Amino acid sequence: MATLLLLPTFISCADIRNVTTENVKIAGSCSQCKEGIEAAAFEKNISKASWDKETKVAAVTFDSKKTSLDAILKKVALAGYDNTSYLAPDDAYAKLEECCRYERTGKNEVVVQMKMSAHEHGATAMDTAANAVSANADPLKPVLDAYYAVKDALVSSDGNATSVKAASLVKALKAVKMDELGSEQHMVWMKVVKDLNFDAEHIEETKDLSHQKDHFSSLSENMYKLIKSAKPSQAVYYQHCPMAKEGKGANWLSQVSAIKNPYYGAQMLNCGKTTEILK
Amino acid sequence: MMDFLKIPIYKALLAVAILFSISGQVHCQKIVRYDLSVNDTTVNFTGTPKRAIAVNGQIPMPTLTFTEGDTAEIYVHNELDEETSLHWHGLFLPNKYDGVPNLTQMPIKPHTTHLYRFAIIQNGTHWYHSHTELQEQIGMYGSMILNKKKEPAILTVPVILSEWTDMNPHNVHRMLHNANDWFAIKKGATQSYSEAISQGYFKTKVGNEFKRMTAMDVSDVYYDRFLINGKNESQLSQFKPGDKVRLRISNGGASTYFWLTYAGGKMTVVANDGNDVEPVEVDRLIIAVSETYDVIVTIPAVKPGSTPTAYEFLATSEDRTKSASLYLGEGVKQLASPLPRLKYFEGMKMMNGMMKMNGDLDDMGMNMSLNQMDMNVVMYPEITGASKSKKKETNNATAMGNMKMDDPGKAGENEHADYNMYISNALSSITTLNYAMLKSPGNTSLPKNAPVKELRFVLTGNMNRYVWSMDNKVVSERDKILIKKGENVRMVIYNNSMMRHPMHLHGHDFRVLNGQGVNAPLKNIIDIMPMETDTLEFAATESGDWFFHCHILYHMMSGMGAVFSYENSPANPEIPNTRLAQRKLFADDRQFHFMAENDIATNGNDGEAMIQNTRWSIGTEWRLGYNDHHGYEVETHLGRYIGKMQWLMPFIGFDWRYRKMEMGEVETNHFGQRNTKDKRSILSAGVNYMLPMLVTAQAEIFTDGNLRFQLERMDIPVSKRLRMNLMVNTDKEYMAALRYIFTRYVGATAHYDSDMGFGVGLTLNY
């Protein structure tokens, strides 16, 4: 009797029924990606996948009565891997191992959003033109935006994201065309560019928050000097927390007046105050 | 003479002509007619066909669209074999069309037609649902869109959120009342001792049970599916990159709050409960049961020539067990980040801190209101971080200690840090909407000089017995609250219960005093979290009886509500017999709930059956051996629960036993009294009291003079599915049992009993 009962369960353990297999392209770069993709697609008796690093194609095998290719691809994307049906959430991608940060070709580069909210400016067509001009007028805007992204990642105490954002900051710093800077700003730029690069690269290299914050503190000082030397296109809030760095205090720049402390992250987020508004 | 006559007649004629032209205009109003046919149907959301109710063959019910100034004519054809009703949620209308059965109308009888006819005198996003029993849970909800005469030109879609359970909702309701923890097992939220120990929260768990609390959760019911417009996943591919889309969102769920997030960036909230608010940009918001929000999202633009992407609009249940998705746009779908699971033991720790020994909540002077301070953030990994390692914590502690020593003047700031540890928006870069951020674009102040009537309510409840009330009174225990036309009614509501409650007022919008002065926003539902106090006010301009209640369906059916009644209102023609109507209205929370359990074991058969309602309990326990030496006994108790927390229950009982003793064998109890167990049939009186650690102490005196004192603890959660029972009494009886839960109704028990010895068996429970 017992064997009779056990037998069917044993059989069902062994394999997926109602088998359908489909080949589908999934983004990835290394053998760790392979593990990640296959783990995400695996569900006992229901689905599994085998991904090829060279072709980036996964053979997905599944029980078509219990699940669908779409459902499996969603799970794969939630694990951080873009595919033909779904794009991974940014934070899932950011959590991938470094070797696995494939180039996100599937993801559309979002056209730079106008930061000015739409209800403040009605005539969009005219604004675009105006915006283009102001973008030229402020060649440091991409740097500042990238800096804000690093700061926000620190605010959420996410070492991985901070590292990813710092990588874009390094790129943004490299992309600055010096000849577009005003003369005064040009002088400051020459002075601080080396340190800016140094700090940004170090933040990128590590995922250790306390190390990142050390560099972020000196990065912020230099950013302050740089931004102060010319009028920014939007208000920049220079903020200070007396308790940061074990009581020594530290500063940062923010795009909003509300205090979100990058040095304390989740523990004491609104410690600090705005000491200067640059505009 | 003639002239004198002529002139007045001429004038009168003119006046009549003018009158006609005005009334002519009145008659020109557009009448919009809908025919709604309510039918039984079968749905299949999970692979198993189940009964549901569809209107015009669809779930959700069809979206009803009107324009301000229209007259609505809605014919409801009840094709069910049961009663029904429809309530127009958030609408201003004559009382008799409000759709509350047995209060503003009699229920719509099976196979009859009922007409709702009212003028549309407002605009905004609203919805409608059945107000009869639990019909809302199984399909009777739909969007109701009231357009402005001149709507802004923007792409718009109605979005209605809901949930589905394969269980019959009456069974859900019954299980909630019997503190069955099957839903917690399904959700992975048992919070058992073994889980507590493995995660380092043993002390927290003990503290929790010491304060007589069972596992904590943010929602009561386990659902199989969450739905957006009736589907778990769907795509609206008509939208193009760069489009701005207004989602007119209603939460038609019976008991689920939803987190709303969007993969394409921030969302702009432009209206709430059908009233415009100043646009406010947020990363996410929680929509309470029965609330509505208008939210504008942007499909991000792409470079010309590249392929478009669809962006996920994600609705996640507050307990984060599951979610529903709506993809806006066409092409490959950009997913939103799923919300990480709750840190339940952190929540438990927080509750321990807030709960006083007498069952009241203690806000420690934080004056919470308007959802600004969300105690639940301690459970949100995305705000307060994933479960931390011990090492990190000690580092922080020393850092904090150093700072304190360095600068004693900063002590004040540290206190602030404590205070802020629940303010979600201060803790992270994620902006979450709260009520303080809502601002009406216009002046909403009430008429000056009107007399003010102030009403204070305390929301009360008891999770163990699933009794939900206001001021510890359920609907049937409370008189109508009288208000007068022309006065300003101010309500101050404090939530002293452990769950949040979305309180809804029929037929009126109230101002939420949220620090925005004359621009206080208008709402008709307010979500009040535990320990929060909110102040609302409205001008009493109507007549008749209006229901004010918690919109969590199972809380409402348990009696959490009150009726606001205008003094000297004309009789409602829809209610021919007011006494009958009241009795039927009160029947909802007076309902008894049945539970039974029986263990068929190798050494005997034992079990219990109980029927209980808000205050009364009738229970029978039996132990039936397989031979005369083991004996047979049945104990029956009829008791009434006393007090808000219902820890005390005096009862009268009847005890019948038969047990064959050996010759000369006499049993005595700890008091030296003899026990006549061999054949006894006596009455008793006694009292139950719930002690800390959820131990039930029972003292009982029998008509033969015998006294018995007993301690019992049932259902100790040892692990996810393992429960332990312990009992000892002064008759020198004791019992220990372990039960493993297989399914909702079946388990296996191993127990040792002083009368019947060791046994293992199969447990069936209902």
Image (spheres, coloured by chain):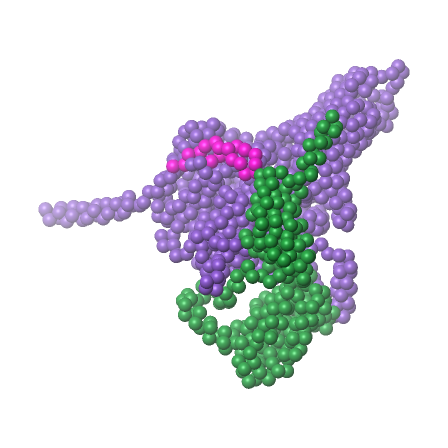
Vertical position of residue B374 compared to residue B727: above or below: below
Residue occupying the far left of the picture: B2
Picture colour for chain A: green
> In the rendered image, which quarter is residue B220 located in?
top right
| Residue A73: % across, % down | 58, 50
Is B659 positioned to the left or the right of A84 in the image?
A: right
Please name whichever residue, B160 or B620, is drawn nearer the observer in this view of the structure: B160
Residue drawn at (62%, 82%) of the image: A190
The colour one sees for chain B in the rendered image is: purple
Q: Hey, which residue is sitting farthest right in the picture?
A: B664
Q: Main secondary structure of the magenta part?
A: strand
- Please tell me whether residue B179 belongs to the stretch shown in magenta: no
Is residue B48 inside the magenta stretch? yes
Q: Is residue B159 left or right of residue B727?
A: left
Q: Nearer the viewer, residue B279 or B702?
A: B279
Question: What's drawn in magenta, residue-wise?
Answer: B35-54
